[in-house]
Amino acid sequence: GCHPDYPEYRNDGLVLTTDRLYRGRYGTNDDDTVTYKLYGWNNHDGSNADVAEGETVLADTDEEVLSIIECPQTAICGIQDDYHHWANHDYHPSSGKPVWVRDSSADVTDKISADKHLGATDELKRPPSKTETNSLTPPLLTPHHIIFDDNIHNDPNDGIVAVRASSKQSKKDSDGKSGMLFAPLNGYETIGMQGIHLVRVPTLEP
């Protein structure tokens, strides 16, 4: 409220029109892996209803989502989170609002449980060490994603943010093209991302 132009300040580049609004939804692939997809806003009423069958997918993979939010021309946008998916998976961090970690130095998929919804392997039912956390930090000059939210906890089984980390492995789409594989970190690894990709902020009063 102390900015000299407040409350009259307006930046047209920050005004979101419907073509820059998306509905983010989790989807299951044929191999039972889970990807994050973007659908258009269209005549959406703002509720968190499921996507209707036959709706056009604007971004079908994690990489396609990143191509939108990392592009200077489309980076300023609004994405509705998939609340029902999160609630249906007991509010587990791996099912929450996604934030992406590009990782070229470590293969994180070996650290992810085969159960894509329910977190840690026996080996990783503990907080990660400083070395493990640093190994998941993206290299310099790559986009560094940060999410600010009031629902970030030191609880490996309850959190709003799904840290989707890339790995050295790749997958092939229906056209046979290879792409980067992303998978959610488990709850303990997600806690290790606080202060790096996750920042807890207090809720503002209306």
Image (cartoon, helix red, strand yellow):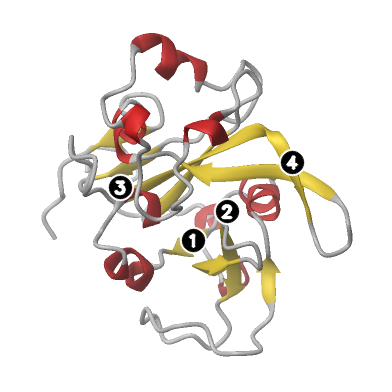
Q: Position of residue 109 (x, y in %)?
A: 56, 36
Residue 206 found in image quarter: bottom left
The residue sitting at 32% across, 25% down in the picture is 192
Q: What amino acid is labelled 1 in the image? A: Gly
Which residue is tagged 2? 13
In this view, the residue farthest toward the top is 131
Residue that carries the numbered disc 4 in the rendered image: 170
Which disc number belongs to residue 6?
A: 3
Mark 2 / mark 1, whichever is N-terminal: 2
Amino acid at the residue labelled 4 = Ser
Q: Return the disc, 3 or 2, that comes first in the chain's sequence.
A: 3
Nearer mark to the viewer, of 2 and 1: 1
Amino acid type, mark 3: Tyr
**Upstream in sequence: badge 3 or badge 1:** 3
The front one of 118 and 45 is 118
Dot 4, how many residues are within 10 Å of its Cα: few (below 14), some (14-19), or many (20+)?
Answer: few
- For label 1, the residue is 78
Label 4 sits on a secondary structure element that is strand
